[in-house]
Amino acid sequence: MRRIIVGLAAVLSIAWLPSTMSAAAPPKPPPGEGVPAFGHVFVIIGENAELGNVNKSNSPYLINTLEPKSAWHTNYYALAHNSLANYVGMTSGQFILCDQNDDPPDTCHQNVPNLFHQLDVAGVSWQSWMESMPVACDVEKEAGTLQDSNTYRVKHNPAVYYDNVEGAGGVWSATNKSTECLQNVIPAGTTEPNKNDMSYFNSALASGNVGRFNLVVPNQCEDAHDNCSPPTANPLTQFDNFLAREVPLIEQSPAYGTDGVIIVVFDEGAGDNIKNKQDKFGQGGRVVFSVESQLVKPGTYTGVFDHYSFLRTMEDGFRLGSYVGNAAVSKPINNIWK
C-alpha cells in the first residue's frame, strides 16, 4: 500500500510541474513608464501666451531654431489662471484658491508633497534659478522695477511656497529658512538695472556645476510678461531673445551631454483665451511645450497633455518611484522618446 501511495504522489507531482513552469510571468512595464532616465533637465518658463500667439515674427529663435529640433506639442494645456496656480500645479500636482489669486507665500504656503521634496528624498540635486531675485530663497512679494528691467516676482518661484522646502524643520518661516532653500533657490545673476543678468547661472553652466533638475525663471521683463526696456518691445520677443541667449549655453554645457533635456513651456495662455481667463479652476489655455534632447524624436506631436503630465514625466524621468497630487492620475509624456 505504501508503494502505491508514493507512486501516486510522484505522478501527481510530475503532472503539476509542467503547468506551473509553463505559466509565464506577466511582463513588467518598462522603467519610467516609457520615459527614459534623465541626466540634467532644464525647464525654462515663459509667461502668458497662447500657442497661437507665438509665431516667426515675434519668436524667431523659438520657431526657426528650437522647434525643428524638438518634440513640439500642439495640444499641451496649462491648468488655470493665474500664474502661481500653474507653477504650483506643475510642481505639486494641485493648487488652491490663493494660488489662483497670486498671493504671496506668507499667506499661501502649503504643507504638501512636491517635486522638490521628492528629489531631495531620492538624492537628486536640484536648483531654482531666479533672474533678478535679490537674495537666495527670497519670499518677498516683489523686487526691482519694470523701468530698470530687473523685476522679480515671488509668484513665479514655487519652491518657496512649500513648507518642507522653504522652512527649517519643515515649518514655513520668513526668517528661519532652511539650508536647502538657501542653497537651492538662488539668484541667476545680479540685480543690476538694465542688464538682464544671468551670470551666476551661465558660470555654473560653463563648469557643469548645476543640479540634475533646473528650474530657470526669467525676470518679468524677459519672460514675456511685460513690456520693458524699451517700453515698445514685444514681450514675446524679449522672451525669445532670452532663449536665444541661454539655450545655446545649456547645449554647450558639460552637464547637457547625451541625456540632458531642455524644456520650454509657458505657464498659462492669454490673449485669445480672455473668456476662459475669468474661470477660476478652468483650463489655462493651450501653450507652447517644446522638448529638446538627444533622447527625443523631433517632430510635431498632437497628444493632449498638461502641467500634471509634465510633473508625472519628471517623476518618471528621475525614477522617483511615486506620484504626487494629480500626477498620479495623469498620463506621462512618453510618446516622444527614442
Image (tube, rainbow, N blue to C red):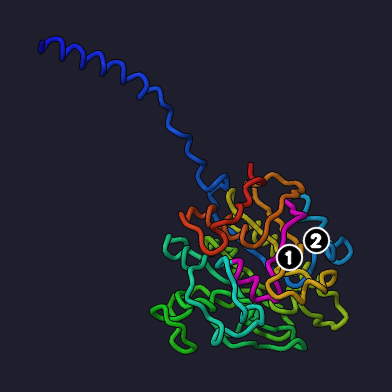
The amino acid marked with disc number 2 is Tyr
User: Is 80 inside the magenta-drawn segment?
Assistant: yes
Q: Could you tell me if the residues under marks 2 and 1 are in contact, i.e. CB atoms within 8 Å?
A: yes
Image quarter hosting the N terminus = top left
- Does the image show residue 190? no
Residue at image point 15% right, 14% down: 5
Can you name the residue that lies furthest to the front here?
A: 1
What residue appears at the point 54 percent right and 74 percent down from the top-left corner? Answer: 159
What x and y, as percent, mark residue 247?
69, 61
Instruction: Please give the residue where the numbered disc 1 appears in the rendered image.
Output: 243
Res. 253 in view:
yes
* Region rendered in magenta: 70-90
How packed is label 2: few (under 14 Cα within 10 Å), some, or many (20 or more)? many
Q: Is residue 139 left or right of residue 13?
A: right
The answer to which of marks 2 and 1 sits earlier in the sequence is 2
Residue 108, percent from left and from top? 56, 83
Say which residue appears at 52% left-offset and 41% top-offset.
Answer: 30
Q: Quadrant of residue 51?
A: bottom right
Tell whether 25 sits left or right of 6.
right
Q: Amino acid at mark 1?
A: Leu
Which one is nearer the viewer's eye here, 278 or 315? 278
Q: In terms of secondary structure, where does tag 1 sit? A: helix
Residue at the disc numbered 2 = 61
Residue 28 falls left or right of residue 134: left
Q: Nearer the viewer, residue 186 or 313?
A: 313
User: Which quarter of the rendering shows the C terminus?
Assistant: top right
Q: Quadrant of residue 123?
A: bottom left
The one of 273 and 167 positioned closer to us in this rendering: 273
- Look at the picture and state if 334 lies above or below 252: above
Mark-to-mark CA distance, 2 and 1: 7 Å
